Amino acid sequence: MARSRQPLIAGNWKMNGLRADALALARGVAEGVKQAGWTDREVLVCPPATLLMAVAEAVKGSGVLVGGQDCHSNASGAHTGDISAEMLRDAGASHVIVGHSERRTDCGETDATVRAKAEAAWRAGLLPIVCIGETLAEREAGRTLQVLETQIKGSVPAGATAAKLVVAYEPVWAIGTGKTPTVAEVAAVHAHIRKILGGLMPDANVVRLLYGGSVKGSNAGELLAAGDVDGALVGGASLKADEFLAIAKAA
Ligand code: PEP
């Protein structure tokens, strides 16, 4: 199990990668992590579900962890096209991202859906990474903190503890845009998130809070050094081993 607030650098490959490229990427990350010999941070890659088993095999022995990008809330059944948390675990996953803004938007996932998926992750023995974040319109209306509070209260299941939960703050307007909040804004929002979580769980002071949204090698150092930031959820920059490893190095 991760040590208290041990930095977690998670790569979300999204719907990218066919077998050859994905395995080359996985091997590149695995090699870099092995060489670095880090014991003070965790590195996770979340490939498309079709590649999960092969990626898990490719990174075996390197210390790199593997996760899913989503799961269904049920363990099995008539849900064509869906994948359960148990199936992810069976394929080699230890983590699963739930409530990514792309799923909230593309698939209409609500806070209640996300909460059920986080509970499913627990049922299967996976660590859920619960994503929250405001849209540009919400930010411009000055509603960021209020939106995040609603998302947290709706998406984090009862019974959460720091060992069973990771929260990723991903401003929707920062995802894939090259734009990021200032370091001071990230620190202030993360402090707020930790405070809200304090009302929901006994050890929110040590729960890991990741920042996500246009993190790359060149800005990772300052974003990861912001108060209450315990790692990063990385999209685009996780598709290049060198860039992703540079972010892990900055942690
Ligand atoms: C993401 O989608 O989780 C993400 C953070 O993407 P990017 O790093 O490309 O902004």
Image: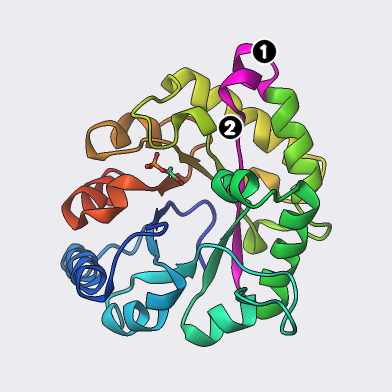
Depth order, front residue of 224/180: 180
Depth order, front residue of 201/31: 31
Label 2 close to label 1 by CB (< 8 Å): no
Q: How many marks?
A: 2
Give, as a single range, the part of the protein colored magenta. Answer: 125-144
For the question of whether residue 230 can be seen, the reply is yes
The kind of residue tagged 1 is Gly
The kind of residue tagged 2 is His
Instruction: Tell me the residue that label 1 is attached to.
Output: 142
Instruction: Tell me the residue that label 2 is attached to.
Output: 190
Q: Position of residue 117 (x, y in %)?
A: 71, 64
Q: Residues within 10 Å of mark 1 (few under 14, many from 20)?
A: few
Is residue 240 toward the left or the right of residue 104 in the image?
left
Q: Position of residue 23 (x, y in %)?
A: 23, 74
Is residue 133 toward the left or the right of residue 29 in the image?
right
| Of the image marks 2 and 1, the number of the one nearer the N terminus | 1
Looking at the picture, does residue 37 appear above or below residue 198? below
- Residue at 46%, 54% (x, y): give it: 6
In the rendered image, the quadrant that contains the C terminus is: top left
Is residue 215 toward the left or the right of residue 89 in the image?
left
Q: Secondary structure at mark 1?
A: loop
Depth order, front residue of 78/94: 78
* Label 1 near ligand 1 (CB < 8 Å): no
Q: Position of residue 145 (x, y in %)?
A: 69, 24
Depth order, front residue of 54/149: 54
Q: State yes or no: residue 123 in magenta.
A: no
